[in-house]
Amino acid sequence: MNASRLKSVAIALAVVAVVATVLGVYIHRTSAPDKAGDTPTKGTNAAARAALTVTTTQPVATQLPIKLSANGNIAAWQEASVGTESNGLRLAEVLVNVGDVVQRGQALARFADDSVQADVAQARAGVAETGAQATEATANANRVRTLLNTGTFSGQQISQYLAAEQTALARVESAKAVLAAQLLRLKNTQVLAPDAGIISARSANVGAVVPSGTELFRLIRQGRLEWRAEMTSTELARIAPGTPVAVVAANGARLEGRVRMVAPTVDPQTRAGLVYVDLPPMPMQSVRPAAARAAASSAVAVAEAPQGALPGMFARGEFELGRSSALTVPQQAVVVRDGFSYVFRLNADQRVSQIKVQLGRRVGDRVELLDGIGADAVVIATGAGFLNEGDLVKVAPAPAPAATAATAAPPALAPAAPAAKP
């Protein structure tokens, strides 16, 4: 019994000792001064809790370009259809292929001309025969004319000789016309390029017998391209011939062009019209491997694979309509929340106000403000994304420009990159 009591007393004393120790530590902490020897004040705690370091800027009035964007397709300025005028002849040779650059009058294909050569020979013989007959008829007519008043020939005979002469001469002209037609057929056995350009399509096959008028090739005339931009009726009124246009093709190629013409009509279904923009021509260089030149019967220039735009590509472009004054701020000063754009204006009490703004054009890292604040307002440049209405901020000096930091870098760092390469 005595042992149990002693054990209970020992436990109670241990608990009292622990409680006293905890209470002493608490009293010591609440009564201890801070490192500076002063007790904290309510004002300094509030300042430490509300301060957020930011940088500020002011809207800048500048001149921004006025641009109008549109979409459209790149197409050939004009695509010539090259066909045959020969009928029922066998295609003996094809001299060009898709992508070849050709000059005006260059032979593109040849038809077998054996039958045409025979017809030409026959027509030449006909001219010679009728010429001989005309010579005899003319001689007879001349003798009759010398004896016209002597009464040797009757009037009927005189008329017959003179008519025979006229008939013979007419047959000569007819034979010459037949010969000219056969020579034209012989000329048409060669298919010639109607203009300089690039072959864009070929349907000619060696050995085929094609009727007259069949298309054999398609030719991009002079390699010229154009961009056909689709625009609404209201936008068409803002475009004038000669307006510069920057076009970006689907493959990333950037082209500079100018408006050639605006379509005089608008599609009644889409209410959109076309604007035709002249683009730089496709490369037309005379480059062909030696093996290819040896295989062809005539030298044909071949276009290098164009690195720029190609007909049929989709492209997006911007029409440059001039410049106008604009109030701009850095893009990082604009905060998008709930689908709306805001900037934070710095007030005199170092607190910020959230101002709803309407954005306009974007050029580089700056964005145009259409309304919301004036040119004399001070807005938060960095750190705006962490702020809310009424926050207290601390303004820090603006950081040095990137160019200054780059020039301050030691020159020895420049050659260090090549040395690190394997």
Image (cartoon, rainbow, N blue to C red):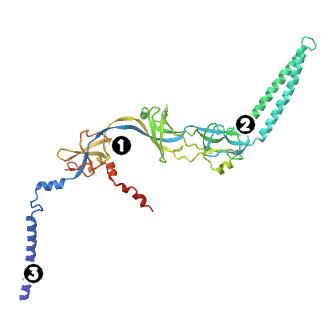
Q: From the image, which quarter does the C terminus lie in?
A: bottom left
Report which residue position mark 1 lands on: 362
Q: From the image, which quarter does the N terminus lie in?
A: bottom left
Residue sitting nearer the eye, 42 or 417: 417
Report which residue position mark 3 lands on: 11
Residue sitting nearer the eye, 291 or 310: 291
Indicate which disc, 1 or 2, sits on the residue closer to the N terminus.
2
Do the CB atoms of the residues marked 3 and 2 lie less than 8 Å apart? no
Q: What residue type is labelled 3?
A: Ile
Identify the secondary structure beneath mark 3. Answer: helix
Q: Is residue 20 above or below residue 282?
A: below
Closer to viewer: mark 3 or mark 2: 2
Left or right for 11, reference 403: left
Left or right for 211, reference 117: left
Left or right for 139, reference 325: right
Q: What residue type is labelled 1?
A: Arg
Q: In which quarter of the image is residue 92?
A: top right
Indicate which disc, 3 or 2, sits on the residue closer to the N terminus.
3
Residue sitting nearer the eye, 234 or 271: 234
Q: In this view, does 185 lie above or below 138?
A: below
Residue drawn at point x = 78 percent, y = 40 percent? 115
Q: Which amino acid does label 2 sit on?
A: Lys
Q: From where the camera sits, is residue 160 visible?
A: no
Q: Residues within 10 Å of mark 3 (few under 14, many from 20)?
A: few
Q: Distance between the residues labelled 1 and 3?
A: 78 Å
Indicate which disc, 1 or 3, sits on the residue closer to the N terminus.
3
Q: How far apart are marks 1 and 2 (CA)?
A: 62 Å
Report which residue position mark 2 lands on: 187
**x, y percent for residue 408:** 32, 52
